[in-house]
Amino acid sequence: MQKLIKKYYNNLTALLHQITVTDRKTNSIGFYEGIEKACGIIMEQEGKGNKLMFIGNGGSAAISSHMATDFIKNGGMKAVAFNDCSLLTCMGNDYGYEHVYEKPIEMFAAAGDVLVAISSSGKSANILKGTDAALKRGCRAVTLSGFDSNNPLSEKGELNFHVPSNAYGPVEVIHHFICHSILDVIIEKKSMHNY
């Protein structure tokens, strides 16, 4: 059992050093620079009165809810995750599951808002459609994906974080780590400079 545990943690540690970040033109960006740029995008848009939106399925939906709450409570920023069960079931029933994020974003998003789209596979139709809807509304987008590095979501964001693993657990853990690191750096930056 301990060998399996050690293997798991060694793999997770190795993956943390293998995260890649690209821009919309798939140019590579260093991880620290990527986090810095993500913080800059969010802080810039927050300063203009814009909000932060999170979308994801399953474990990624849980990350979305957690991070929206933390950005509100700890970061003092306007944030929302569109995964209330009545909203999801209404949109899924009336429009089809692939539209459950697209429709609320069309109604709720304003130009300059920031979308954080989280998908382990980077191929979920509802996440792709939600991201497209946000971009059409003039939002800025940051994506987090895993599995295949050429997944369609990883080409849609202004910044695209990719975890090179095909296992949901490590991808989700690292996506959560990335989101928390962005928030925690913003909080520290604000406290240092009375932002």
Image: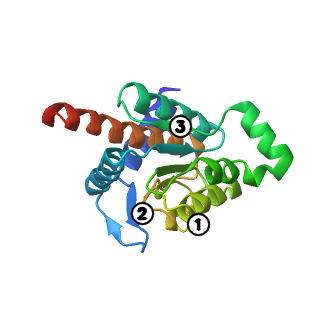
Please name which of the two marks, 1 or 2, marks the residue nearer to the observer: 2
Between disc 1 and disc 3, whose residue precedes?
3
Instruction: Say which amino acid is labelled 1.
Output: Pro
Apparent side of residue 27 relative to residue 155 in the rendered image (left or right): left
**Residue depth check, mark 3 versus mark 2: number of the one nearer the observer:** 3
Farthest residue toward the left?
Answer: 193
Give the camera-side residue of 184 and 112.
112
Secondary structure, mark 3, is strand
The mark that comes first in sequence, 1 or 2, is 1
Q: Which mark is residue 158?
A: 2
Q: Quadrant of residue 194?
A: top left
Residue type at numbered disc 3: Val
Please give the name of the residue rendered at 79% of the width and 38% of the height, measured from the top-left corner: 89
Q: Position of residue 41 (x, y in %)?
A: 34, 53
Residue wearing tag 3: 80
Q: CA distance from mark 1 to mark 3?
A: 24 Å
Seen as rendered, the residue at the extreme right is 93
Identify residue type, mark 2: Glu
- Which mark identifies residue 152? 1
Q: Quadrant of residue 190?
A: top left
Question: Where 190 falls versus 23 (above or below)?
Answer: above
Q: From this viewpoint, is residue 3 visible? A: no
